[in-house]
Image: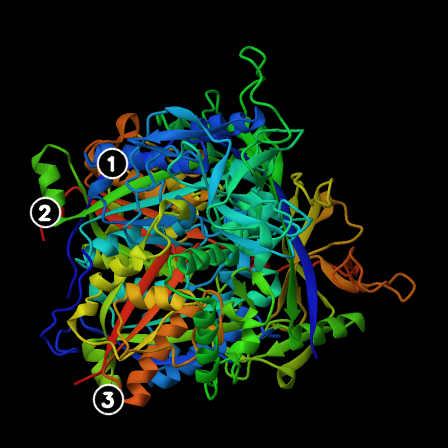
Amino acid sequence: MSGVVESTIQFPYKRSLGPVMSAFMTGLRDARLLGIRNGDSVLCPPLEWDPATGESLPNDLVEVGPAGTVQTWTWIAQPTKMHPLDHGFAFALIKLDGADTPIVHAVDAGSIDKMATGMRVAPRWRAERKGHITDIEAFVPGEAAQGASAAPAEGTAAEPVTMMDYHASITYKTPITANQLRTEQANKEGRFLGLRCPACNRTYTGDRGYCPVDATALGQEHEVDLPQTGVLSNYTIITPIQYPGQTETEPFSRIHVTLDGIDVVLGFQSLIDVPVADVRIGMRVAAVWASDAEYVDPDPRWEGRLIGWMPTGEPDVNDPDLVNRMP
Amino acid sequence: MAHHPCAIVGIGQTHHKSRRWDVSVAGLVREAALRAMEDAQMTWRDIDAVVIGKAPDLFEGVMKPELYLTDALGAAGKPMFRVHTAGSVGGTTGIVAAHHVETGRHKTVLAVGYQKQSEGNAQFALGSGRGASLGAGGAFAPYIRAYIHRSKAPMDIGPMVAVKDRLNALKNPYAHLKIEDISLEKVKASPMLWEPLRYLESCPSSDGACAVVFTDEAGGKAAAADGRKPAWVLGSAVRSEPMRFPGRDPVRPQGAVDCAADIYKQAGITRPREQVDCAELYVPFSWYEPIWLEAHGFAEIGEGWKMVEDGTTSLSGSFPVNMSGGVLSSNPIGASGLLRFSEAALQVRGMAGEHQVDGAKVAVAQAYGAGNQYFSMWVVGSSLDPFGK
Amino acid sequence: MAAANAANAAPGANPDDIAIIGWSISPMVRRTDKTEAQMLLEVITGAVEDAGITRAEIDFTCAGSCDYVAGQAFSFVQNIDALGAWPPKRDSHVEMDGAWALYEAYLRLLIGDIDTACVMGSGRSSTADPALIYPMEMDPFYLAPLGVDAASFAAMQARALIDAGKVTERQMAEVAARCRRAAVGNPHAQVAGEFDVDTLLAEDYVRSPLRRHDLPPITDGAVAMVIARADKAKELCEHPIWITGFAHYAESHYVGTRDLRVSRSTELAAKAAGIEAGPIEVAEIQAAFTHEEPLLTEALGLGADTIVNPSGGPLAANPIMATGLVRIAEAAGQIRSNGKRRTLGHSTSGPCLQQNLVCILEASN
């Protein structure tokens, strides 16, 4: 048995540049390349400090390039979605004229045969530039910059670039363990699976692979069925904060359910049809599963087939220790 | 035994804000590091190794940032080490840096903790990009409800802590939140975010960094001879425990109790409430002050809240807690632990400015992380033998 | 500064000497169906059993793993479940290879108040495309937005070496063939067997001048190791394997500011670890790309007498975040099982070998 669950971590990061990178990125927007003086040499791309010693550098920027020399390179025959070009290209260390250290960038040479250490390249500027390293679409063989003339005249320049966007997106395929799969299968059948540690007799939810106290692996032979009724033993009411990917807009409760007759607490469960003002410790609750008609597999709305928990209508349990029962 | 004394001779921090858009990540980290070196009257050349701590890389979207920050921290040609122990990481970073010196293998070590939360979004990162994230407060709210039930503390205790720490923050030039008109009424009128935790009982999300220069006994004594008081590490400890298993008490975590016992033993402390002058504890949510006062033996079980209620933990009280304004006033997560540890050191150096506790000679600092699972703690003193052993 | 132990004293004579007394390496596979915690559970059990102790007797634990490999913030928090950390344990975690977790534990034991530590490294690199993950560890302004990954940097370093006449593509293919031949019989190898160099050289480039065989496989795996202070090591183990030199150094992140034909931080680490005190019989080095082998062996000052990566090295199995600690375990294995007296484990991190760690091991007298 095996399977994978796919999830994508993506986020639009917003980065502040600080003074030196701000000048560099502003230069890119204006189709100019800037380096910074570091003693007798010029560092490009510029840093605020000497990479060898960490000493702060005076903010003494000088224009370099636009052409430069390839010091070393690699050919990428099949680009990824994160690469600047969608066809074969080279990454190269390019020492721009007037600079003493090379910049890393793409070279759009057409084919690997056109690439050579020592070749001369110049930037091909993007038409729409925003102050970002990809304002240079790529370097191209030759001496002349393409796609834009040099910077606009003084006085016409827009505000300096101080921020940059960075969008990261990585899709992960995480394996589902045998225990997780059986727990999911039980869930589809409207059951809670548990695992009992043979060493200490503690019981865990079925998706755990081990007892964390004894560091004992748990498997099918340790499975027990967990009760479907319990007591609300603790809770919180969350006012959702908005962030990319957030799915909630109104305050919602998350409850801890201490299952009947067993030392298992299910944490942060959904409580159904109970206004947040009525949530209270001691409330008797029962699991609610989606009917065959409601259920689609997989269902993004719920944890598998479990919709959540509903009050049973029985009298509350009055036990002052309940609040201490947490997962 | 290779246990050599370790002195703190330089401390620096940034002005913490919700958005430090005037600097890059590296610029932020350097701001703290340069202040620490200035305090230590050192240059990059004097640093033998660098230890970086920060919380999840997803927060800024830079994986293993110690690589990118090597140059900015003058660490080219030096050992560069990266620690990550969740919220306790800043504390652990200080301890790992101190160990570098205590083994005698490194003379002078720079520890740096930082977070630039404005680059990303903590709420997003905590949920790894998924919806309906509980957020840090959501995870801790049930623990706090349990503490309130157990201790029978009045509901005002949390808001009182929130007010006290924000009043202290007004005296700290580096603090993020400066709420001039902070009051009990204002805290209680703020939105309930994670019931029973209100907005103003919760930490902010900050950009910030903290840096500390550690050096050996000779270096510490040389600084002292030069009129620059060092702080001495008298004891340090870390503990971790699993998050979920029947029988664990997440409200009074054993790891926190053990950490305190460990550092007291190392420092020869038998009566912490009397022998320690002040404490800087990791209180991202107001109720954690009484929780930690009890776990660390400053109060009996169930009594910690009384030290809040009667003003004992205020800056003018007999046992001040979170003199800097604490995590409730500034929370660059990866730096937060090191800020606590630094504040304790500033106090025993007599360099805490307006939030100085008069005559502080011994101070405790603590940080914790994940589901009340990771703990780091130290005790620092104005001398290596503050109790005249 | 970091210094090697006194060259003259027999290893283990000083109570501050630290020894490896047990370890366990997981199966190395293209895709595991286990969680990281489950992989760790097994190797920790294996390592403590190998050391002849129990989890309860471990005084300190330190793990190396990476959120971006796991695809989750705070991913290591779940791994604590593998430690049996109840009662609570002295514990730490580095967002670095397990080899650096070993370094932290080594320092922790040098303090002298506790005797044993268990260190780990774990990673499931199979879960996402390395070409998408590894640009994330580059400068977030100038490099990450271009999607330059570790393999692209490695390829640029390989070309710099080729251009300098320090290695040829054929020699690189020979390294791949030799490593994968050596891996035959290594139960922890993922890629092993006989490969014909001419056939390898006929393949297309992945990142020129690197072909598929010049790159490491994508591997899921974990490793755990138990170390102890001298008295405890000698009590528990008939032949402890002594750590007699241990150091790591970083250099500039910006590869353009470095001379890519050398590895200065490796040279620094080797010197600080006292490599010159005697011959190294076997070196297990984290040369994940074929051209890195000659570069690193030169930086380490190794001669033709030194056997390099008899396990097959990272070209046979490359469990990111564990690869370096596996090298140290394999180097220890050469002393335990093959009668070697002095071996070396090496680890690295960052673009073009930005950060390097050297751990020198010696047999008991």
The answer as to whether the residues below labels 1 and 3 share one chain is no
Amino acid type at circle 2 is: Ala
Residue closer to the observer: B39 or A97: A97
Tell me where residue B267 sits by quadrant: bottom left
Tag 1 subunit = B
Amino acid type at circle 3 is: Glu
Dot 2 corresponds to which residue? B218
The answer as to whether the residues below labels 2 and 1 share one chain is yes
Dot 1 corresponds to which residue? B37
Q: Residue C21: give x, y in percent of width and height.
A: 30, 81
Taking the view exactly as shown, the residue that stands out farthest to the left is: B225
Q: Secondary structure at mark 2?
A: helix
CA gap, disc 2 and disc 1: 17 Å
Q: What is the quadrant of the N terminus of chain C in the image?
A: bottom left
Q: Secondary structure at mark 3?
A: loop
Tag 3 subunit = C
Using the image, determine if residue B165 lies above or below residue C193. Answer: above
Dot 3 corresponds to which residue? C238
